[in-house]
Amino acid sequence: MLAPAGPAAAEIARGGWLMTGLFTVVWIGVLALLWHTLRRREPGAAPRRPERLILWGGVVLPVVVVAALLVYGTMTSARVTGVGEEPDAVIDVTARQWQWHFRYRDADDRIIGESIDELAMPLGRMVEFRITSEDVIHSFWIPRLGGKIDAIPGRVHTLRLRADRDTPMRGQCAEFCGLEHARMVFPVRIVEPDALEGWLATREPRPADEPPSADAPAGRAPPRHGASENVL
Ligand SMILES: [Cu+2]
């Protein structure tokens, strides 16, 4: 999250640092006021007229700071979710206990490949993720690329992310979804755009009736290709 590798994550990191700086200034101001008050108060003396301090420090200052952050946050949120960006590629994301299932679409909306618990993204291309769940609420999160968004059964949430750096990164389910929630991680491979189809060709999806391979981690269900369409 602190080492952003795309525009949405960079926006989040910038906002985080801005707020950290701003609130550090406010915190130092509060400490200075406290020190000033304790230093000047004579024992037993009544406090001097506190109304002006309450008006400026307790009403005007918070209204100005919070209103400025509201405007900044509203302007930033579109850039964080990629609203208005034209996607170069589309990946359907289906979460289930406990697995991530990715389906890759071409420009004509045809599915060109699938992968399980492993995601490939073309370098420097805006990817639209269409995120849903088959069972409980999960949350799709690649910290180095952007913010998290919930995967909710019966709904499709859209998130547009771009990877500008060819560096290994990882995604994580960010919503507790059951006993194996912590294992809902997936490596994110950033590949050259021309190499995506070649990468997908090496990820042959298993047929629906094939049992999970012996080396699959315990508790992980095989992909249920047939069932997912009915839910959507
Ligand atoms: Cu999950």
Image: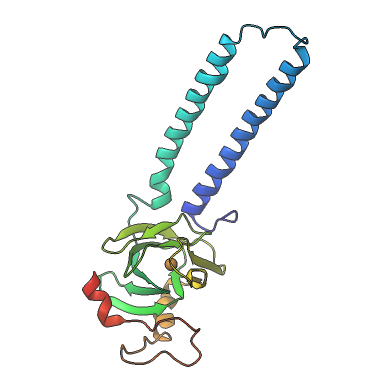
Q: Nearer the viewer, residue 213 or 68?
A: 213
Q: Is residue 224 above or below residue 124?
A: below
Q: Which quadrant holds residue 17?
A: top right
Q: How many marks?
A: 0
In the image, residue 30 lies at what x, y percent? 65, 25
Which residue is located at x 48 percent, y 33 percent? 69
Residue farthest toward the left in the current orientation of the protein: 230
Q: Which quadrant holds residue 161?
A: bottom left
Q: Nearer the viewer, residue 184 or 22?
A: 184
Which residue is located at x 68 percent, y 7 percent? 46
Locate ligand 1 by image quadrant: bottom left
Which residue is located at x 44 percent, y 77 percent? 195
- Specify how the rendered protein is coloured: rainbow
Q: Is residue 39 above or below residue 210?
A: above
> In which quadrant of the rendered image does the N terminus lie?
bottom right
Which residue is located at x 54 percent, y 58 percent? 5
Q: Is residue 70 above or below residue 182?
A: above
Q: Which quadrant holds residue 200?
A: bottom left
In the image, residue 109 lies at what x, y percent? 25, 70
> In which quadrant of the rendered image does the C terminus lie?
bottom left
In the rendered structure, the answer to whether residue 11 lies left or right of residue 85 reads right
Residue farthest toward the front in the current orientation of the protein: 44
Q: Is residue 82 above or below residue 109?
A: above
In the image, residue 196 lies at what x, y percent? 42, 76
In the image, residue 95 lies at what x, y percent? 37, 70
